[in-house]
Image (spheres, grey):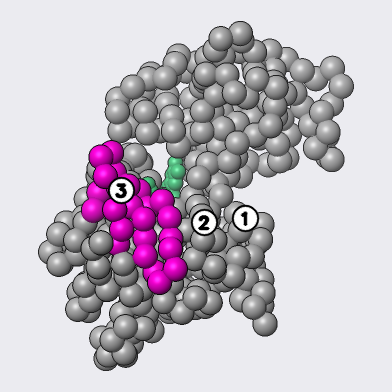
Amino acid sequence: MKTTEIAVIGGGPAGLSAAIVASRLGAQVTLIDDNQRPGGQLIKQTHKFFGDKTHYCGTRGIDIAAILANELKLTTTEVVSGTSVIGFYPGSVLALADRKRFFKLSCKSLIVATGAAENNLLFPNNDLPGVYGAGAVQTLVNVYGVRPGKRVLMVGSGNIGLIVSYQLIQAGIRVVAVVEALPRIGGYNVHAAKLARLGIPILTSHTIKSAIGREYVTGAIVCKLDRKFHPVKNSEHRVKVDIICLAVGLTPLTEILWQAGCHMVYIPELGGHVAWHNETMQTNQKNIYVAGDVSGIEEASTAMLEGRLAGASAFEYLRGKSKESRMIINETRTELRAIRQGPFSRRVVRGKKKLAKSLL
Ligand SMILES: Cc1cc2nc3c(=O)[nH]c(=O)nc-3n(C[C@H](O)[C@H](O)[C@H](O)COP(=O)(O)OP(=O)(O)OC[C@H]3O[C@@H](n4cnc5c(N)ncnc54)[C@H](O)[C@@H]3O)c2cc1C
């Protein structure tokens, strides 16, 4: 069994930032990620980031991953890639598995930055080959250079649905339509406008009713929804597609936190069950911290800030407060509050407030 002071699970923006900060402060850190390449979601994001100027706005996600990975290389963090954490045992022992081995890692403190999984949608034939999560399609196209089909129906007009649609067009795939159950487009106008300029219909108050096909997707039935989200009679029409892409939200990946006995609370605004945590990302299990999408679905910019907070707090838990750790925590909390002032953060702020009250 290996040992470490701080184990970080997840090498996305949150986990990388946590490891960089904790390691720079002087802690022994081990970062485990199931991908071969560090960066989490960022490695497939070829678009320039939206968000705050001070948090890599205008830089491509893939380049942000490289910047963070280079910063990590300058620290003493041990990186265990291509390895999944598959269990948590009492005494803060993690079970790790790669393609060949099963082994254990004992830690004094744990930062869980596992990110999120894509949501599925219930409709007939949703298990046919050709029905994908939008993130999966983005990985195929942008990371592996594989076009999964020729014509796509995108379900969901949040930023992910809009951005992935545009990237599919860039890859030579025809986006037949984007359907959105709400009466309005969910994502930023700037992303919707790019599709509108190319003549891609974004059908609000519409959804997918079923997928068509015997062995794989050959089409889909879409229909209109009324104000109560009920299908409007005789509004169905058939679209010819070979990919149905679901961009209908994400759910925090919390299995390790459940196993560790953290106090879990269902907060819809944060994407589902999340671990209760305080303002420095500490859970009710004092040596366990969370950061990024696993603590509530948000953005890479906030994931990086939460990671910094978790890294500095875990360091203080082990070694006590230092001038530097205090400065990082205070500055990062101020930045996080500032970045969450915008209208798109209202939902998350509401969710975090609900969560704070849940342990009273
Ligand atoms: C299409 C799209 C566009 C986006 N655009 C923007 C944008 O413009 N601006 C912005 O700020 N945000 C954007 N985001 C959101 C941003 O990518 C995420 O909020 C951010 O990546 C979350 O960071 P994270 O570190 O919490 O999780 P992730 O980036 O998901 O990283 C988690 C990592 O943990 C690993 N992992 C999970 N479980 C385990 C385990 N048990 N063992 C080992 N490893 C594990 C995962 O494989 C992954 O590598 C976008 C997201 C998408 C999908």
Query: Are the residues tagged 2 and 1 within 8 Å (C-beta)?
Result: yes
Would you place residue 302 above or below residue 360 in this image? above
Identify the secondary structure beneath mark 2: loop
Q: CA distance from mark 3 to mark 2?
A: 21 Å
Give x and y (percent) for residue 256.
Answer: 47, 58
Residue 254's disc is: 2
Query: Closer to us: mark 3 or mark 2?
Result: 3
Would you place residue 104 above or below residue 116 in this image? below
Residue 281 horizontal side relative to residue 307, left or right: right
Residue in the image at 28% along x and 86% along y: 319
Residue 88 horizontal side relative to residue 80, left or right: right
Identify the secondary structure beneath mark 3: strand
Q: CA distance from mark 1 to mark 3?
A: 30 Å
Which is more N-terminal, label 3 or label 1?
3
User: Counting other residues with Cα less than 10 Å from the Cα at mark 1, is it few (<14), some (14-19), or many (20 or more)?
Assistant: some
Query: Could you tell me which quadrant the N terminus lies in?
Result: bottom left
Q: Tell whether position 232 is magenta.
A: no
Residue type beneath disc 2:
Thr
Is the residue marked 2 within 8 Å of ligand 1, measured from its CB? no
Q: Quadrant of residue 248?
A: top right
Residue in the image at 30% along x and 33% along y: 143
Give x and y (percent) for residue 82.
Answer: 27, 44
Residue at the spot of label 1: 272
Q: Quadrant of residue 268?
A: bottom right
Query: Closer to us: mark 1 or mark 3?
Result: 3
Please report the bounds of the magenta region as a residue range: 80-105
Query: Could you tell me which quadrant the C terminus lies in?
Result: bottom right
Residue type beneath disc 3:
Phe
Residue at the spot of label 3: 102
